Amino acid sequence: MTIEEEIKKRRTFAIISHPDAGKTTITEQLLKFGGAIREAGTVKARKTGNFAKSDWMDIEKERGISVTSSVMQFDYAGKRVNILDTPGHEDFSEDTYRTLMAVDAAVMVIDSAKGIEAQTKKLFQVVKHRNIPVFTFINKLDRGGREPLDLLSELEDILGIQSVPMNWPIGMGKNFQGLYDFYNRRIEVYQPEDDERFVALDEKGEIPAEHTLTQNPFYAQALEDAELLQDAGNEFDEEAVIAGKLTPVFFGSALTSFGVQTFLETFLEYAPEPHAHKTVEDTEVEPFNPDFSGFIFKIQANMDPRHRDRIAFLRIVSGEFERGMDATLLRTGKKIKLSNVTQFMAEARENVENAVAGDIIGVYDTGTYQVGDTLATGKLKTAFEPLPTFTPELFMRVQAKNVMKQKSFHKGIEQLVQEGAVQLYRTYTTGDLMLGAVGQLQFEVFKDRMEREYNAEIVMTPMGNKTVRWINPDQLDEKMSSSRNILARDRFEHPLFLFENEFALRWFKDKYPDVELMEQFSV
Ligand code: G4P
C-alpha cells in the first residue's frame, strides 16, 4: 500500500460528552468492533482503576504514564481509526480542548434523559470554531428519556447546529422496540439475536406485514414520526456535514451495543480523511506532502514522582514517520532523532515503526518540547499556526512557600506557563500572581511539577470561578476596576478583567456601554 493510500484510510476523531453520558461505554463498544479489546469493561475498569496493569503498554508499566487511554487505534472496514480521549470529570483541562485541535471529526454523545449538558456545550464550542464535522449519538434509549424531537430541537437551540436523524427510536425505555434506520432502510429490532436484528424495509418504508412489530403501537408512532421528519426535517447533505453545519444524529444504547455498529459504519463512511493544516504564513501543508510534519498538542507529565519524563503527543500532518528519523524542531531549529516514540493500540503495545498523516504518536520528552511546537523534515520550514489558548474559568493566587526560593519559583512558573500547563496573570497594579485553568486538575499537576521539577513549593489560594474579558488598552481606565472585578494583565501584558460572575459583567457593560470587551479565545 502506498503512503497516500495509508493516509486515506485514517479517521481521527474525539468523543465529546458530559461525564456519565456514556463515552467510556461507547468507546469500549467501538474498540470491541475493531477487535482491539475482547471484553467490554476493559476501558471502564481502567477508568475506575481496577484494571490489570499487565494488559497495558509497557511504557505505562515502566514509567507509570497513562498514555494508552489517551489515543486508541483500531482497524475497521478497511479504515484505520484513531480515537482521542478527551478527559472529563476532574481531569478536564486545557489539554481536553487542545486535543480537539488534533482531530478531523468529533462524535458527541448525549444522554437521552439529560439532553445537552454543560461540558458538552463547552467542548462543542471548540469543535464549532474549527468547522469540523460533528456526529451525534443519543444514548441510553433502553432507559428512556426525553422526546426525540425535543432532543433534536435542543441541538439547534442550544448548540446552533442543524441536525438530520439517521435513525429513529421505536419506543424508549421499557417500551424500547428498536430503531427505524432511515439511512440503511432497515429496522434494527431490539432483541439479542443478531441474525434477526436487522429487518429490511420495503419501498414504502415499512417492514413485512407478518412481522410482530407491525402490531406494536410504538412502531406505528415511529412510522408517523418518520413521515413527519421526511416532510419537515433536514435532508442529509454530505457537504453540510463535512463543513460542520449539519450533524447526523444516531439514536442507540451503548450499554446494550444497540445502534453502535450502524453508527460506526455510517460514521466511517462520512468522516473525513486527514485534512491539510495551516501554517503561520497562512499557507497549508497537505497530508500527502512527502515531507514529514506534525505539531504537538499535548504534553503529558509523568505523575510518578520517581520519574521526570513526559510524553509529547504529536499529530502527524503530512508524510510518514519512521522510527529513528531526524526531524527539526522549528521553534529552535534543533535536529532531533525520533527514536523513542510510542503509538497507541489498545492491546498491541509496541514501539511504533511507522505512522502516517492522521496518526498520533507519543514522543518521549525530557523537556525539549512545548505545546504547539512543529516538527518537520525536508522542505517544510514554516511552523504550523499556534494552538489557541482557552479562556480559563478557575483561578488561584499563587506564591512561593519559601521566600528564599524565589528564583526556582519564577523559573518553574515561566517554563510551565510557556509549556501551556496553566495560564498566568498578574494583578494590574500590584503584580500579584494568579493562575488560571479550565479544570482543577491543571492546578494539581502544576503544583506537583513545581515541587518535583523545580524544587519550588507553592501556596495556592483558590479564587473560585471568574469570567474573563480582555479590554482594548486604549479604552482602559484603572478606575473601572471595582470590588466586583479584578483588573489584571496576561503574560503578553494585555489588560483584562476577571469578573466575579456574569452579573458583575453585565453591571460593567451597563456602566461602560462603549467599552469593548473581548471574550473566548485570545488567539
Ligand atoms: P462517561 O464515560 O461518559 O462518563 O460514561 P460511562 O460510559 O462511564 O457511563 C456512565 C454510566 O451510564 C454507567 O453506569 C454506564 O453503565 C451507563 N450507561 C452507558 N451507556 C448506557 C446505555 O446505553 N444505557 C444505560 N441504561 N446505561 C448506560 P454507572 O452505573 O455509572 O456505572 P456502572 O454501574 O456501569 O459501573
Image (cartoon, rainbow, N blue to C red):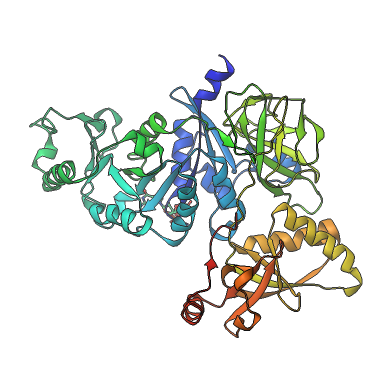
Compared to 375, does 522 lie above or below?
Answer: below
The furthest residue to the top: 1
Looking at the rendered structure, the number of numbered marks drawn on it comes to 0
Residue 240 position, x and y percent, is 35, 39
The residue sitting at 21% across, 50% down in the picture is 175
Residue 18 horizontal side relative to residue 138, left or right: right
Q: Position of residue 307 (x, y in %)?
A: 81, 48
> Quarter of the image containing the N terminus?
top right
Q: Position of residue 37 (x, y in %)?
A: 52, 34
| Above/below status of 368 relative to 156 | above
Which residue occupies the extreme bottom position in the image? 483
Residue 300 seen in render? yes
The structure residue drawn at horizontal position 13% and vertical position 28%, both measured from the top left corner, is: 202
User: For residue 373, which quarter of the picture?
Assistant: top right
Q: Nearer the viewer, residue 516 or 223?
A: 516
Left/right placement of residue 161 relative to residue 390 reads left
Instruction: Give the image location of residue 319, x and y in percent.
Output: 63, 24
Image quadrant occupied by the C terminus: bottom right
Q: Which of the 4 image quadrants contains residue 178?
A: top left
Q: Give the residue displayed 80% in from the left and 43% down from the top.
A: 368
Vertical order, 14 against 111 (above or below) = above
Left or right, 49 with reference to 122: right
Q: Quadrant of residue 33?
A: top left
| Residue at the image position 13 percent from the left and 32 percent from the top | 207
Residue most extreme to the front: 474
Q: Is residue 50 visible?
A: no
